[in-house]
Amino acid sequence: MLLKTSSSYNQDIRVFGGFWGPKLFVNGSWQSGPYIRKLWTSAFKKFGIDQLLNIQTILVFGVGGGTVIDLLAKHFPTAAITAVDIDPTMIAIAKKYFTIGSLPNVRMIQADAKIFVNKESKQFDLVIVDIYIGPKIPEFVSSPSFLKNLHALVRSGGFLVINYLRELEYQAKSDALRVRLRALWKHVEDMNLYNNRFFFAG
């Protein structure tokens, strides 16, 4: 184990070393590593994210170990990526133990996503929502107000991707999320993979 710590937002944060690089384990749930990379790689392939053109500005909510940020930087090497996380400890860990600290076009901001979406006036070509507290997703992620604010942050012709869950109580919540997305975007797709349900809107 490379690190064991906690923060005001996460009680149990661990970084493990390994042959495939460091892995992040938070509150009983993996938040980076081969499994998380497989999830996002599958979602990118399903929705054709890596085939999108004219992606120059990207906004990511949820830093974690930076798996999705690393993938985005590889697919869109000239794009400016803004990554937002409420927990400064997670940002510090991402910079020290993972690749994000060395990526030239990534800017990390410590902020509450709920507040950020209300204050940010810039629009983005691609917005990614990957907000977890351990194995849970905060209630606001699927709320009509948050989704409406996200819609305002996506430029005309841009895209939104949300990494959500679909098991137990999240089955009904994910169905409700799809309905709310379809009320805001003309085109909405979703994909089930293991315990996750990914949404793509544009």
Image: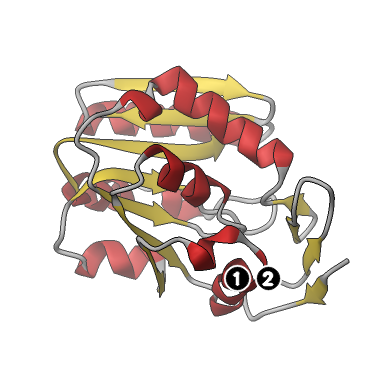
Q: Looking at numbered disc 1 in the image, what kind of residue is underneath it?
A: Met
Q: Which residue is mark 2?
A: 10
Residue underneath mark 1 = 90
* 3D distance between C-alphas at marks 1 and 2: 9 Å
- Which mark sits nearer the N-terminus, 1 or 2? 2
Residue 10 in the image, given as x and y percentages of width and height: 68, 71
Discs 1, 2 touching: Cβ within 8 Å: yes
Figure quadrant of residue 76 = top left
Measured along the vertical axis of the image, is residue 126 above or below residue 25? above
Tell me, yes or no, if residue 130 can be seen here. Answer: no
Residue 65 rendering spot, x and y as whole percentages: 62, 58
Q: Residues within 10 Å of mark 2 (few under 14, many from 20)?
A: some
Circle 1: element type: helix
Foreground: disc 1 or disc 2: 1
The residue shown at (32%, 38%) is: 160
Say which of 180 and 72 sits in front.
72
Does residue 79 appear to the left or right of 172 in the view shown?
left
Question: Residue 157, position in %: x, y?
Answer: 14, 32
Is 61 in front, or is 97?
97
* Local crowd size for mark 1, using a 10 Å CA cut-off: few (<14), some (14–19), many (≥20): many
Q: Secondary structure at mark 2?
A: loop
User: Which residue appears at 51% of the width and 21% of the height?
Assistant: 191
The location of residue 144, given as percent across then percent down, is 31, 45
- Taking the spot 69% from the left edge, 56% from the top edge, the residue there is 134
Q: Is residue 42 visible?
A: yes
- Residue type at mark 2 is Asn
Quarter residue 88 falls in: bottom right
What number of labels is visible? 2
